[in-house]
Amino acid sequence: MQSRSDRYTTREEVEALLAQTRENAGKRGAKKTPVPHKRSPWRLVRRIVYGLVIAALLLMLGKVWYARLNGQVPSLFGYQLYVVETGSMIPTLPIGSNILVRELGPEDTLQAGDVITYDHGTAAVTHRIVELVTGDDGIVRYQTKGDNPENSPDPWLVNRDEIRGVVIWHFAWSQLIGQ
């Protein structure tokens, strides 16, 4: 049967084991130098690409933040995101739908049937072009109307410089997550 003192290592035993370990290490030879790890050239490429992606994301976030601070609608790569707040475009765009709008370029032509987002007062309105109206001055303006069957054509005409862009895609978050 072991006594209580047999279960513990004494100070002298610890020092003897430490001395023996040092002695064995000296017998094995000089201090080993670590072998340098061979780095893959792809590792450097991956790090550079990763850094560029992070920098691009931070730049885009800064641009969105700056636009919001100045009361503008953020635009990334010529695209804007809006949320439908009224029922004027039901059944095409239900309330709460998100719409992706591509900004108009100088060479873009609009025609009847295009769904556009434009400025009207302080609001952004999304309606469908139902007719192109050429005025006496030769300038083309657009007659718009919501898709809701209860709507009548808007009582105003939209100038090209008031148009923010053309709706290219719409979705609801519930559709994206499968509900």
Image (cartoon, rainbow, N blue to C red):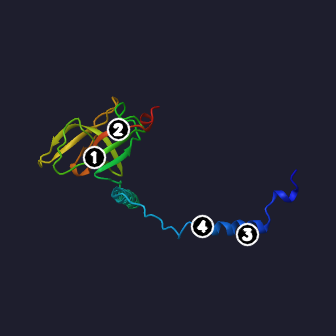
Per the model, the C-alpha gap separating discs 2 and 1 is: 12 Å
Per the model, the C-alpha gap separating discs 1 and 3 is: 77 Å
Residue topped by disc 3: 15
For this rendering, which residue is in front, 138 or 175? 175
Per the model, the C-alpha gap separating discs 4 and 2 is: 71 Å
Residue topped by disc 4: 25
Per the model, the C-alpha gap separating discs 2 and 3 is: 76 Å
Residues at circles 3 and 4 in contact by the CB criterion of under 8 Å: no
Mark 1 and mark 3 lie on one chain; the one further toward the N terminus is 3
Residues at circles 2 and 1 in contact by the CB criterion of under 8 Å: no
Residue topped by disc 2: 170
Kindly give the residue lying farthest to the front in the view shown: 27
> Is residue 22 depicted above or below 53 in this figure?
below
Per the model, the C-alpha gap separating discs 4 and 1 is: 71 Å
Q: Nearer the viewer, mark 4 or mark 2?
A: 4
Q: Secondary structure at mark 3?
A: helix
Q: Amino acid at mark 1?
A: Arg
Residues at circles 4 and 1 in contact by the CB criterion of under 8 Å: no
Mark 2 and mark 3 lie on one chain; the one further toward the N terminus is 3
Residue topped by disc 1: 102
Q: Nearer the viewer, mark 4 or mark 1?
A: 4
For this rendering, which residue is in front, 125 or 68? 68
* Local crowd size for mark 2, using a 10 Å CA cut-off: few (<14), some (14–19), many (≥20): some
* Spot occupied by residue 38 in the image (x, y as percentages of width and height): 39, 60
Per the model, the C-alpha gap separating discs 3 and 4 is: 15 Å
Q: Secondary structure at mark 1?
A: strand
* Spot occupied by residue 147 in the image (x, y as percentages of width and height): 31, 33
Mark 2 and mark 1 lie on one chain; the one further toward the N terminus is 1
Q: Secondary structure at mark 4?
A: helix
Q: Amino acid at mark 3?
A: Glu
